[in-house]
Image: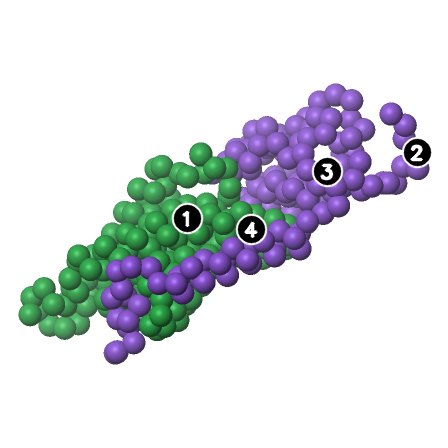
Amino acid sequence: MTARSSAADRRRPTPWDFVVALIVAAAAVALLFLLKQESGNFLTATVVLDGETIAQYDLTALTGPVTLEVEDASYPLTIQAEPGRIRILESSCPGLDCVHTGWADRAGQQIICLPNRLVISLEGTSSGDIDAVTG
Amino acid sequence: MSISLRRLTRCAVLTALALALSVAEGLVPLTIIFPLPGLRLGLANLVTVYALCRLSGREALLILIARCLLGSLLGGNLMALAFSLTGGLLALAVMALLLRLSCLSLFGVSIAGAAAHNTGQILAAMVVLGGTAPLVYLPPLLFCSLVTGAVTGGVSILLVHRVPALGDIKS
């Protein structure tokens, strides 16, 4: 076993370590660009539970706060939508990553509650299905 | 002490250490400071790096599997098992490959391992959710893995050099 100690015996970083870091950073930036979404004037939030769409909100058109209680989920949770943004207010899932994610207010953002297999995704449309909206 | 018994003992000790590290890490979650699902320092990965450098790939794999199985029994659920196993196995494979390159140090190996771990977790999440939605979390996780990988890389250099190979203690 001669190969096993070569990288392990070094005590200082080598230039190639920075190459590895650069590759990781480049992959992250490339993914960011790939996933970038058009941010239009209209923001739609879609709530998908276990592959089925259970609710859809036109966040731009909301006039006041709306709450949705999802009782069917394995860990019941409450979703709160306001004009322009949405979040998971409270959840009984372990970890509470979805609650800690906080508000989502930009197109392309997602709030995921993995234990519940629930995804809230935000999409932006420049014109939307609505033909004319003034204001 | 016979060879196989010594091997078994050191694998058991390292498994216990990896478990203790991941439990300790769970007590101070990074996600409180930076809300990003799946973000963690990856202290248990130190044990994988040590096992890869000082024991063998086979033993590192056994320790990893035992740690994931016991870890999900201790605190998690079946879903947590799927996540730690996919992430851990991918990280182990990438690090085992990179350790063969003589031009890298443990910094680069750890960063690549951390990035591979995050990629594995996101892949598992995509399978669980049946869609590409979790991909959104990958770029920020990759940026974080640069930091967490460098930190665990620095610690693992200390660990590998300060702690003698377990087989050499007696002889």
Q: Label 4 neighbourhood size at 10 Å, few (<14), some (14-19), many (20+)?
A: many
Horizontal and vertical percent for residue A127?
86, 40
Identify the chain drawn in green. B
Colour purple, chain? A
Mark 4: secondary structure? helix
Query: Of the residues under marks 1 and 4, which one precedes in the sequence?
Result: 4
Q: Are marks 3 and 1 on the same chain?
A: no
Q: Which residue is mark 4?
A: B139
Chain on which label 4 sits: B
- How far from the left and from the top, in percent, is residue B2? 11, 72
**Which dot marks residue B147?**
1
Same chain assignment for discs 4 and 2: no
Q: Amino acid at mark 1?
A: Val
Q: Residues within 10 Å of mark 3 (few under 14, many from 20)?
A: many
Label 2 SS:
loop
Q: Residue furthest top?
A: A64
Q: CA distance from mark 3 to mark 1?
A: 33 Å
Instruction: Classify residue B92 as left or right of residue B142.
Output: left
Badge 4 amino acid: Pro
Residue that mark 3 sits on: A45
Q: Return the chain for callout 1.
A: B
Q: How far, Cα to Cα, is label 3 from label 4?
A: 22 Å
Tell which residue pokes out farthest to the left in this image.
B171
Q: Nearer the viewer, mark 2 or mark 3?
A: 2
- Which amino acid is tagged 3? Ala
Question: Would you name the residue on which mark 2 appears?
Answer: A132
Question: Mark 3: which secondary structure?
Answer: strand
Give the alpha-carbon distance from disc 1 to disc 2, as whole Å.
48 Å
